[in-house]
Image (cartoon, rainbow, N blue to C red):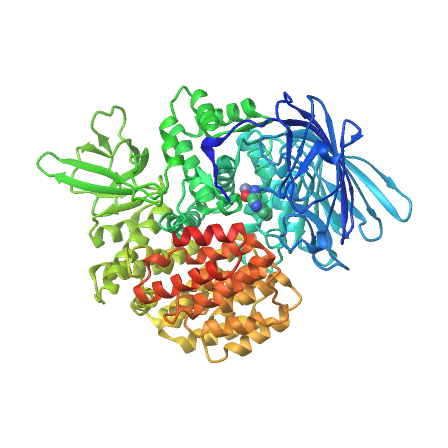
């Protein structure tokens, strides 16, 4: 297929003002009658997208069309003679039970017990009916659903309810009207046996709304936490952005069969059950947080995405980056801001920096795509959010809000672009934000080099900032981008110094933001009493890699003394990275390692430190990020071994006894509650048990056994299982967990995932055996991600076996999955992203596996796109 290019964008020839749909639902076959009122100058035929649709009838202005008045292609229908204001009516048949792609209208669960639902973003509506399926065609929708009442007692579509009643033969109907013009990707319907919990909500502007959360009967008692999170999100958006909900009902439905996390369909959000259901016995603390975050994210889309949508899919980050940013701010307000920032930045570095460094690197606003489903990426989402954060930081809270008000008001009911977004934020504040556009168009992670020079005689500190972005595929030459560097200076005792930036008037502050707006710039600080320690990029003020020649002792000072939790962590990560570099080079007692261990050993004894923060500080950078420090010839075994050595040194430095005592003290006050203190204790227990396992494995295993017997929450149970899986009774521990949770799909996903992540070359065999477990199926995306995703993306020593068996295993499965669900296959194939930087033996093996996948199978457009780009 030819690529779609941003530069080819043209406004639609035909617009649609209203859509009327009548849907007769059944599992094997459903019929959809659609009437479109269309507008255009009639110069060109009306072209409607359509895929896997059986056309039964076609009428233009009430008249059935002969075959010579239209042309049907594989992916479209072209109709002649259409005029401005014409009504085009189609009747099609689709087969939901045969739809394994989970895009369009499909069946969740079994034919007997499951329910019907739709997924339309990005291009799924064309699998339901013929339509100009692009986000800049906005219409109002009236949807009538009809189905057998006993089999489909609940009928839902987006919009306000507009009547319901009985039909003959045990059938019934329900109608929904959505008055807000929307693009087709936000259409949704659900039909089946579902239960609900409801809550009344009054918006700040006085609308009474019914909130309904729907799930299958066995899960409806697991929706309470999500309902609370929804209410918190709605209030927060009113208070923070002045945005109110705009329909009389808001439905959220949980399904176990879903390609992604959740979907923001107007008035009818649909969620992967993983992000809606939560109970202490089944969900970990971090899963509770994900539920809160995803509920908020989808709800926030009601304004950032639905009321103001995207002109084309190149603008995807306009809604996704902005909505991730809004969710991150919300979650920070609801929880610990520094822990949230640590989690978000680690994710960015693990997922986005690696993407930016590999063959799939692309700008936040890509300039072309072959398959849009492959652009729901960490770059569009996470880096996109960082760009909004930088701009918001540049404006300050008040001006950002003013700009957002203008953006929402100016573009309400429209399909907008990233230029529109920057223009609204800028114009509201009489500022020019166009320099930030450079960030949106350029792939790659800028390297920010900082060089500090202290002149004792002048008491002057000069900081030189320099930027450079490495080339990425298709973009050999890069331009400078505006980089805000939030910074502070510390003295050797770890105290912040007042900042007297040259040419700047006013009271000296302790923190400032330096704007690097070209390739290089110098900043001069006066009145600096001693050679300072710079704390740079505070709060991760820009998504860049910082290169500064710290001596280890200076990083240790920041790790010990920075009052900002995030920066403490950032300093510790840099220090552990330096210790790792030395370890990999054979230096087993480097100055960095000593400084890191000393500082952490001191913090371990600090009674005032937040246990959740301590838990984060005690963990060195992940293997995935550490591998990124190596330019070429990465050996994942060596990376693993070096990181294990860091943990080992730290554990020994703290000492087995102190680790045991601290663990026991935490366990003695443990509760299963979800309050922040109990969660923080569980987080720290996990880190300590990990360290204890390094120095006293038997003591750690004994504690894991005891924990398993005592605990009533999933965080602890999973920690215990994870630990026991590395001991002599691994299989018994796995079997016991399975026995307890075999009826709960979400718990079983964790069971598959934790086993797939056991480090070492033997895990491949375990994963192969698990494929035959009766609870496993390649048809369910959650199950595939739990087992194969965890193995290939979160188990470097397991997947990257030197004999290439991990690669051959994955490509064989990719071919099978691709035949069922291309989106899932394509996402899984991202595991090969870093193959070119592997050491030669693995590189060759990975290349061979990928090349055979490409040559021996007829791949879907989704998977072919990823594989080809990986091989280019
Ligand atoms: N806007 C959604 C993105 C999406 C999606 C969701 C479910 C299934 C397939 C999907 N393709 C794209 C999710 C979000 O970002 O909110
Ligand atoms: Zn989203």
Quarter assignment of residue 367: top left
In the rendered image, residue 864, in percent from the top left (x then y), is placed at 49, 53
Residue in the picture at 40% in, 76% down? 697
Outermost bottom residue: 728
Left or right: where does residue 333 sit relative to residue 844?
Answer: right
Quarter assignment of residue 173: top right
Badge count: 0
Residue in the picture at 30% in, 34% down? 512
- In which quadrant of this rendering is ligand 1 seen? top right
In the rendered image, residue 119, in percent from the top left (x then y), is placed at 64, 46
The foreground one among 390 and 260 is 260
Outermost front residue: 68
Residue in the picture at 91% in, 48% down? 169
Outermost right residue: 168
Residue in the picture at 28% in, 58% down? 632
In the rendered image, residue 50, in percent from the top left (x then y), is placed at 65, 41
Residue 691 seen anywhere in this rendered image of the structure: yes
In the rendered image, residue 38, in percent from the top left (x then y), is placed at 68, 26
Quarter assignment of residue 476: top left
The foreground one among 3 and 773 is 3
């Amino acid at each position: 297929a030819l690529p779609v290019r941003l530069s080819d964008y043209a406004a639609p020839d035909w617009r649609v003002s209203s859509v009327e749909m009548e849907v007769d639902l059944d599992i094997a076959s459903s019929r959809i009658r659609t009437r479109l009122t269309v507008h255009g100058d009639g110069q060109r035929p009306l072209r409607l997208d359509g895929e896997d649709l059986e056309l039964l009838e076609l009428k233009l202005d009430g008249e059935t069309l002969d075959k010579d008045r239209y042309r049907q292609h594989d992916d479209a229908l072209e109709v002649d003679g259409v005029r401005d204001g014409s009504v085009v009516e189609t009747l099609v048949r689709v087969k939901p039970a045969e739809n394994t792609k989970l895009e369009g209208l499909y069946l969740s669960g079994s034919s007997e017990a499951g329910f019907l639902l739709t997924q339309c973003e990005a291009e799924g509506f064309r699998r339901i009916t013929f339509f100009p399926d692009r986000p800049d065609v906005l219409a109002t929708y009236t949807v009538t659903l009809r189905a057998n009442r006993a089999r489909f007692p609940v009928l839902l579509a987006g919009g306000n309810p507009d009547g319901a009643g009985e039909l003959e033969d045990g059938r019934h109907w329900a109608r929904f009207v959505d008055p807000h013009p929307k693009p087709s990707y936000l259409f949704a319907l659900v039909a089946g046996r579902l239960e609900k919990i409801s809550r009344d909500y009054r918006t700040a502007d006085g609308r009474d709304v019914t909130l309904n959360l729907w799930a299958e009967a066995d899960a409806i008692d697991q929706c309470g936490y999500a309902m609370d999170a929804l209410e918190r999100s709605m209030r927060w958006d009113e208070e923070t952005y002045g945005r109110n909900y705009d329909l009389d009902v808001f439905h959220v439905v949980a399904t176990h069969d879903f390609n992604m996390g959740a979907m923001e369909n107007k008035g009818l959000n649909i969620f992967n059950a993983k992000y809606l259901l939560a109970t202490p016995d089944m969900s970990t603390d971090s899963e509770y947080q994900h539920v809160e975050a995803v509920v908020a994210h989808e709800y926030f889309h009601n304004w950032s995405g639905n009321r103001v949508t995207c002109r084309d899919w190149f603008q995807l980050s306009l809604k996704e980056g902005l909505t991730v940013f809004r969710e991150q701010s919300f979650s920070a307000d609801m929880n610990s801001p520094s822990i949230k920032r640590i989690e978000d930045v680690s994710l960015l570095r693990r997922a986005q920096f690696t993407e930016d460094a590999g063959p799939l690197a692309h700008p936040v606003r890509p300039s072309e795509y072959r398959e849009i489903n492959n652009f729901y990426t960490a770059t569009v989402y996470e880096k996109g959010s960082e760009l909004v954060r930088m701009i918001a930081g540049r404006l300050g809270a008040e001006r950002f809000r003013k700009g957002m008000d203008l953006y929402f008001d100016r573009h309400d009911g429209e399909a907008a672009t990233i230029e529109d977004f920057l223009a609204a934020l800028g114009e509201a504040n009489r500022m020019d934000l166009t320099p930030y556009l450079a960030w949106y168009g350029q792939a790659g992670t800028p390297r920010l080099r900082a060089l500090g020079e202290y002149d004792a005689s002048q008491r002057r500190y000069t900081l030189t900032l320099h930027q450079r972005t490495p080339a990425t595929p298709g973009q050999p030459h890069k331009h400078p981008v505006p980089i805000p560097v939030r910074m502070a200076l510390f003295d050797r005792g770890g105290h912040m110094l007042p900042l007297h930036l040259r040419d700047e008037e006013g009271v000296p502050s302790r923190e400032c933001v330096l704007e690097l707006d070209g390739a290089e710039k110098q900043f001069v600080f006066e009145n600096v009493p001693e050679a300072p320690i710079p704390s740079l990029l505070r709060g991760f003020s820009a998504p860049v890699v910082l290169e500064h020649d710290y001596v280890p002792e200076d990083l240790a000072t920041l790790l010990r003394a920075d009052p900002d939790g995030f920066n403490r962590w950032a300093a510790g990560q840099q220090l552990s990275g330096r210790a790792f570099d030395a370890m990999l080079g054979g230096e087993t007692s480097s100055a960095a390692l000593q400084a890191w261990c000393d500082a952490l050993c001191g913090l371990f004894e600090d009674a005032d430190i937040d246990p959740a923060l301590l838990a984060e500080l005690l963990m060195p950078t992940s293997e995935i990020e550490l591998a990124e420090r190596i330019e070429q010839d990465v050996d994942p075994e060596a990376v693993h071994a070096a990181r294990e050595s860091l943990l080992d040194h730290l554990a020994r430095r703290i000492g087995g006894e102190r680790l045991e005592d601290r663990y026991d003290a935490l366990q003695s006050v443990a509760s299963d509650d979800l309050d922040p203190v109990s969660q923080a204790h569980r987080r720290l227990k996990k880190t300590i048990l990990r360290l204890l396992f390094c120095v006293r494995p038997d003591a750690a295993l004994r504690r894991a056994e005891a924990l398993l017997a005592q605990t009533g929450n999933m965080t602890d149970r999973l920690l215990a299982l994870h630990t026991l899986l590395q001991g002599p009774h691994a299989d018994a521990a796995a079997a016991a967990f399975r026995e307890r949770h075999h009826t709960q799909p979400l718990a079983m996903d964790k069971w598959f995932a934790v086993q797939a992540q056991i480090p070492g070359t033997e895990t491949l065999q375990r994963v192969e055996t698990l494929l035959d477990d009766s609870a496993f199926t390649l048809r369910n995306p959650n199950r595939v991600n739990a087992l194969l995703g965890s193995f290939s993306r979160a188990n470097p020593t397991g997947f990257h076996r030197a004999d290439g068996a991990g690669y051959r295993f994955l490509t064989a499965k990719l071919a099978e999955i691709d035949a069922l669900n291309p989106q899932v296959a394509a996402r899984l194939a991202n595991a090969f992203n870093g193959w070119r930087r592997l050491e030669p033996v693995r590189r060759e093996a990975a290349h061979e596996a990928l090349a055979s996948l490409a040559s021996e199978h007829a791949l879907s457009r989704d998977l072919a796109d990823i594989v080809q780009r990986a091989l280019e």
